[in-house]
Amino acid sequence: MKSQENLTCTSPTRVHSNLLLFLLVLAFNGFSQSLPESILFTSGEQGTACYRIPALCTAPDGSLLAVVDQRVPSCADLNWNVNINLALRKSKDNGKTWGNMRIIVDFPDGESASDPSFIVDRIESKIFLFFNYMNHNSQPREYRHMVMYSSDNGETWSLPKDITEEICSREMKGYFRFITSGRGIQTSDGTLLHTLVTLEDGVYIIASKDHGKSWFRLPTAIHPADETQIAESEEGHWILSARVNRVGYRITYISKDNGQSYTTIVDTLHPDPGCNAGFLKIKIQDKTYFFLSHIHHRNERKGLQVCWSSDGCQTWQEGTILFDGSAAYSSITLLPENQLGILYEKNDYSQICFKTLSIDEIIDKTEHPLNIKSPPHH
C-alpha cells in the first residue's frame, strides 16, 4: 500500500474534465473503428446442410442486403444439388443488427437457384438480384440465368425473369456457364454491367441499356478467367478482376473501348488460390481507389485480405488481413462514415459473417485524408 503522503486529491472539476475527455475519446473511436464480426448464417442450422456464396449490397435507402445460397441437402454446387434456395437478411443500421432470415427464392424440389449477385440501379432506385437456375427433373445439366428486382429496398421482389436466351447463343446451350456471384455495376452513363462465365470461351460481359428491361452479351470474351468482378474507372474504363484457377494469382483486364478489346495485367506477386472476390471503386477527394477483398494465399483458401490500389489496378498495396484462417468467397460494399462492409465465408464454409472495416485501417490516413463521395455508382 502507498503511504499516506503519496496520496493526492483531485478536485471535482478536474475529475469531470477527465471523464468528459475519456468519453469523447470513446465516442471518436466508436466512429472510426470497425464493428465486431457478426455471424449471419451457420451451416447445419434450420435443417440446412450448408450456406454458401455471399452477395452484399447497399440499397438506395442505405439498408444492407445479404443474400446467400441455402443449400439444403448438401454443400454441393448447382449442377449436383437438387434443393438450393436463396436466403436474405437485412440490416437498417449499417450492419449493427440484422433482421431474421427470409427465403426469397424457393423452387419445388428438384429445382435449384444458386450464385446470387446484385446490381443497384440508383437512377431507378431498383435492386436487381441475379441467380443461376437448374431444373434437375426436366433439364438436368442445363444452366439457366434469372433476374428479379425490388423497388422497395428488398422488402418485396418481382417474379424471376429468365434471360438465358438474351445473353446466350444457341451454340452455348451445352456450355458450363454461370453469372458471377457477388455483384455487377451501374456505370456513370447508367448502363448495367455484369459478367457471364463460360468454361469453354472465357468470361463475357452482359449489359442492359434500358435499366434491366432487356439484356445482351458483348462478343469479346476474356481468357483465362473464371468468376470475374467489374468496376469502372473515373475515365470510364472497365476494369475486371478475374479469378484464374491453378496459377496462384489474379489477372486484371482493362477495356478502354466499352468491352471491345482488353489489355492484361498479370501480377504474379499478388497471390490468389482461385477464388471469387469482392471488388469496389471509391472516390476519395480527387483520387480513385479500388478495394479488393480476396484470399491472400497462392494455393489454399485461407487468409482473407482487403487490399487497395490507387493507380487504376496496375499495382496493389497490401491492406488488412480480415481473417487469417480458412476463408473463401467475399462480397464488399460502401457504408457511411468511411467504412467498408464485407460479407464472407469462413471456417471451412461453416459460417458466413459480416464485418465492417474502417478505410482508415486500410489506407494510411495521414497520407490520404478521407473525404468520400457517397454513394458512387458501383
Image (spheres, helix red, strand yellow):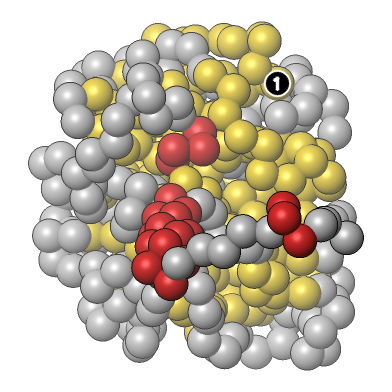
Quadrant for residue 18, please give it: bottom left
User: How many numbered discs, if any?
Assistant: 1
Residue 201 in sight in this render: no
Residue 294 pos. (x, y %) = 63, 37
Q: In this view, does 141 lie to the left or right of 200?
A: right
Q: Is residue 3 left or right of residue 373?
A: right
Q: How crowded is mark 1: few (under 14 residues within 10 Å), some or many (20 or more)?
A: some
- Of 7 and 218, which appears nearest the observer? 7
Q: What residue type is labelled 1?
A: Pro
Residue drawn at 36 percent across, 87 percent down: 155
- Of 365 and 244, which appears nearest the observer? 365
Residue 26 pos. (x, y %) = 48, 60
Residue drawn at 30 percent across, 78 percent down: 153
- Of 131 and 44, which appears nearest the observer? 44
Quadrant for residue 112, please give it: bottom right
Residue drawn at 65 percent across, 63 percent down: 37
Establish if 17 lies above or below 319: below
> In this figure, which residue is indicated by the disc labeled 1?
271
Establish if 42 lies above or below 211: below
Residue 48 pos. (x, y %) = 80, 82
Residue 80 pos. (x, y %) = 80, 63
Establish if 28 lies above or below 45: above
- State which quarter of the image contains the N terminus: bottom right
